[in-house]
Image: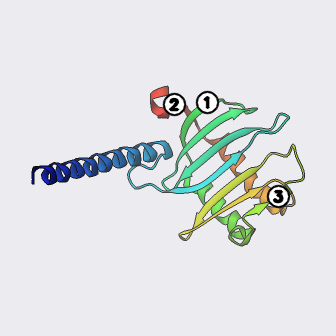
Amino acid sequence: MTKNLFSFITIIVLIGSCSTSKNKIDAEMQALNGLTNGTHLFSTIKRSYCYGTCPVYELKIYANGDATYHAIKNVELEGFYSGQVSKKSRGALSQKAKDIKYLEMKDVYDNPGISDLPSTTTSIVINGDHKEVRRRYGYPTELLAFEKLFDEIIALTLWEKLSDAEKK
């Protein structure tokens, strides 16, 4: 009987600690992704490395206009930044996505036989529908106009450098 009670208590403690760990991990993931106060990701762009001087960065824009910018290489700023993207800019992204039929595009445009091409991945949520497109080769040129809007948003946004503590 004592052995069964000990086993039962051990199981309860393990379940409780797993739940606490899971909650801690969930909280850390939300902090990393900037998901605070119920704010959801609206649109993103991520530009990857190449063998040359390609800009490398990641921009995340949330539904409330909050934005995070991780400027990595070959860009004007370097480091982690936060800013606020206007409703007008977010609306322009949505409108451009509708104009180019972004939601109907393929998920990936690529030719793995070709090297030294950077990839660019964009995403957006329109009317609750999430779409992500990764492009490297053989993509519709309309996609470049969509990506250009992100570059304009980066240039127009007042960025505040994040401290090491805020990055986490």
Kind of residue at badge 2: Leu
Q: Residue 31 in the image: x percent, y percent?
A: 44, 43
Q: Name the residue under label 1.
A: 79
Residue ranking furthest to the left? 1
Q: In which quarter of the image is residue 97?
A: bottom right
Q: Residue at x 85, y 36 (%)?
A: 51
State left or right for residue 55 relative to residue 23.
right
Do the numbered discs 2 and 3 sit on residues whose CB atoms are within 8 Å? no
Residue ranking furthest to the right? 114
- What is the basis of the colouring in this image? rainbow
Q: Mark 3 points at which residue?
A: 110
Bin the neighbour count of mark 1 within 10 Å (Cα to Cα): few under 14, some 14-19, many 20 and up: some
Sequence-wise, which precedes: disc 2 or disc 3?
A: 3
Sequence-wise, which precedes: disc 3 or disc 1?
A: 1
- Please tell me whether mark 3 sits on a helix, a strand or a loop: loop
Do the numbered discs 1 and 2 sit on residues whose CB atoms are within 8 Å? yes
Kind of residue at badge 3: Asp
Residue ranking furthest to the top? 164
Marks 2/3: CA distance?
Answer: 34 Å
Q: Which mark is residue 162?
A: 2
Quarter in which the N terminus is drawn: bottom left
Q: Which residue is drawn at 56% across and 42% down?
A: 68
Marks 1/2: CA distance?
Answer: 8 Å
Q: In which quarter of the image is residue 95?
A: bottom right
Q: Residue 14 in the image: x percent, y percent?
A: 27, 48
